[in-house]
Image (cartoon, helix red, strand yellow):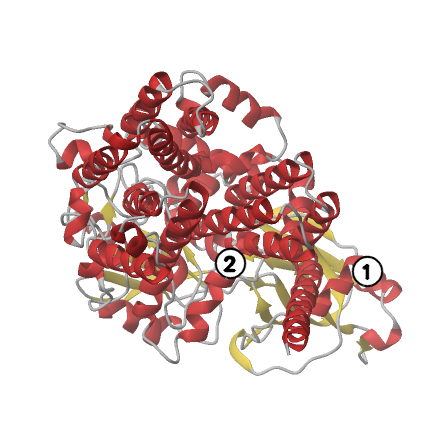
Amino acid sequence: MSSLARWSARRPVGAVYCIVLVLAISYRVLPTAGILAYGDYPYFWPGRAFDPLSTMQASFFGLPRPTAMFVTWLAFVPAALSRVMPHELIAYLLIFGMLALAAFVWLDVTRRITGHAELGYVAATMLVLSTVTMEHLVIQPSHIFATMLALALLAHVALEIAHSRACTTGNAVQLALVTLLVTHPLFWAVHVALTAAVLIVAIYLGHTRGIRTALLTFLLIPLLHAFWLVPFILTTLTSTNDVIFNGAQDAIFEELRRTTTYVSASTFLQMGGAWQATVYGGQLPYALTFGAPALGAIVLASSVRGTRGRGVLAASIAVYIACVLLTLGPNAPLIGPIWNFAYAHVPGFGLLRHFTRLATYAQLASIVVVIASLAVVAEQRPRAYRLAIALVLAAIFATQWPLLNGNANGAMGAARIPRAYEELNARFLDTPEDFTVVTYPATGYEAYVWSINPRTDVFRQFIYFQELAFAKPVAFNRYVAPELSTSIPWGAQAFAYDSTFAAYPGFDDDLAKTDARYVLVHRDAYDLGTGAPVTDVQRYTDYFEHDPAYRLVADNDSYALYERIAYLPRIRGEQITFQRLNDATYRFTLRQVSGSRTVRFLQHFNTDWAWYPDSPHTCEPARTFDEHLVECRPDVHHEVLDAMRMVQHPLAAQHTLVNGYANAWTFDSPSLERRLAPSEYVTNADSSIDVTLLLQYRPQQWFYAGLIVSVTTASALVALGLTSIVRARARAT
């Protein structure tokens, strides 16, 4: 082995290389300018309303979120670290730190599998450059970078099993824990399938304890993920495709197919570098897309049958082609009809709205194709091996050179959220009352002139700012427009996209059917569909300025904020005191119930809302709307023991649809007295009763039950690991 090969085989050198490479592509977006807008949204924003533990989202007027619980440690790490470091730095480390770690693990795994240290550097280089390029097509770098890290660790465990010729309990624990890194349901399903493939191969090759390890692994995986699997599976079994994904699956899916270009086959054929056609003036489009399989095909055709690694090369080419076809989704010439048939007839197939994420596996397969090709060359033509590596590295850097100046040739940057939005939270939204903010203009995806990438000819970044940064729920953009425009008689007009929106007679009355206290008109909106800022906002401001039901309370370069003077809360009815405990749980005190009593709840209509008796509670009033309706300060928390309500029969009440989208329940005092124990209500002098009830979205109970299982399993595994370490040290001494 040459001195260069020995030097490159050292792990510290590989780690430094990966860190330097990641810094080289991102040093210009180091978090010095504000919240990092690289990706969909900032990872952390003080005082945000987003609740990752809730199965019902108050944003968008209460749409169910059966997959939202999939947010794992990525949702909590920023909040935990925000006391010791700026949240901009947290965002940078979570995004690019994961990428550097994934690159290093892939470097080490490739070196160990092939026996060639230099191939590890090729793999790490391709992973970093092509993954960052890929991110501009496939949203949320947290999903992709964490998935790449999980796949690298899976390969690492598989390599350990192969070398030891035995499967152990430790391997099962490792394989199960690695799945916690995968923070997207589709990626998780693929990762679990790959884990199964590793164990099946081990069993087939006769590794000792293979079957036992496989059984233990697939016992631990669902237990660790019970916190989201239980509500997700139960919701999927009881729902159709149109409500599986945020309650708006059909509408979103159709809207994407009609209005976006990233689902077109021609665009996805550039997935190895989507911006190349524009950056290079069309000179090098599809370079990586066709370059990797072309190299593999040439090496495969010129190699001798029986050469070591030739079978892996052929398999990786086949996997690459399959992933590309799946990535093209419903618009692909071959896959499209099959995809659409499955979407219409296979329960749960709505999950694959994220077919674009399959490009991640195509990208990884292209890396395997290149590495396998070079390994075959090393086996069959040693003299040409180093030349082949040099040419491949030169091609990789040549096709991805815009990344190497630190900000993708001006196409990515760190965005500073205007201070006006911090003032909006502090002055108007950070209040004890609960209400919704409706924003205009509505566009297909949320974007702003301050968050859009400088090179819009390359790609246009969007950022889920409102949903995650505002201190109150927000109704905006693609969630509201497709869902409410199809399910509410008045929704198509009230929440129309900017290109078709116009005020109409009754517009104000329709907004009054919601719990919207404020209307926010953005002056800084950017329309991704047209590729330009939204400049015609005068038609919105003119309407609200001349509407006596509203008053202007804030006006600046970023937005105009209008308050509804006669605003009414999310809960409506007579003689009611209510309190929000979380988006999926509310506490009500119904006073002086005699005869029938109707409670209106302005959240998305759903039959999974259920009523339960509760003990009387005192609360601090936040606002009294009239002598009959009192809102208490929210007591936001989660009672995990509410999982016990799964076996409790809810109270019966007549459930009806109101306002075209919301819930109403009618109670009567005789039935309440029959169902409740004498200690659960108070009888007044006029024979009316006062009763405290809990309204809860039942999937939240399923989530709590799964969370108990997940935490218990994780704690047991940690205890087992610590015990093993102590025993190993004791044996060593």
Q: Quadrant of the C terminus?
A: bottom right
Pick the residue in front: 107 or 68. Answer: 107
In the image, farthest residue toward the front = 1
Q: Is residue 432 above or below residue 212?
A: below
Pick the residue in front: 564 or 279. Answer: 279
Q: Is residue 443 above or below residue 602?
A: above
Across and down, in percent, residue 18 comes to 30, 56
In the image, farthest residue toward the left = 281
Residue in the image at 52% along x and 41% along y: 186
Task: Answer whether residue 448 is visible to the viewer in this image.
Answer: yes
Q: Is residue 669 left or right of residue 90?
A: right
Question: Does dot 2 land on a helix, a strand or a loop?
Answer: loop
Q: Are marks 1 and 2 in contact (CB under 8 Å)?
A: no
Across and down, in percent, residue 66 comes to 58, 49
Residue under circle 2?
Answer: 58
Question: Does dot 1 land on a helix, a strand or a loop?
Answer: loop
Circle 1: residue type: Gln
Circle 2: residue type: Ala
Q: Is residue 164 left or right of residue 340?
A: right
Task: Answer whether residue 563 is visible to the viewer in this image.
Answer: no
Across and down, in percent, residue 145 comes to 39, 51
Q: Is residue 214 above or below residue 429?
A: above
Q: Is residue 549 left or right of residue 597?
A: left
Residue under circle 1?
Answer: 648
Pick the residue in front: 396 or 140. Answer: 396
Pick the residue in front: 412 or 629. Answer: 412
Q: Is residue 183 above or below residue 282?
A: below
Residue in the image at 50% along x and 43% along y: 187
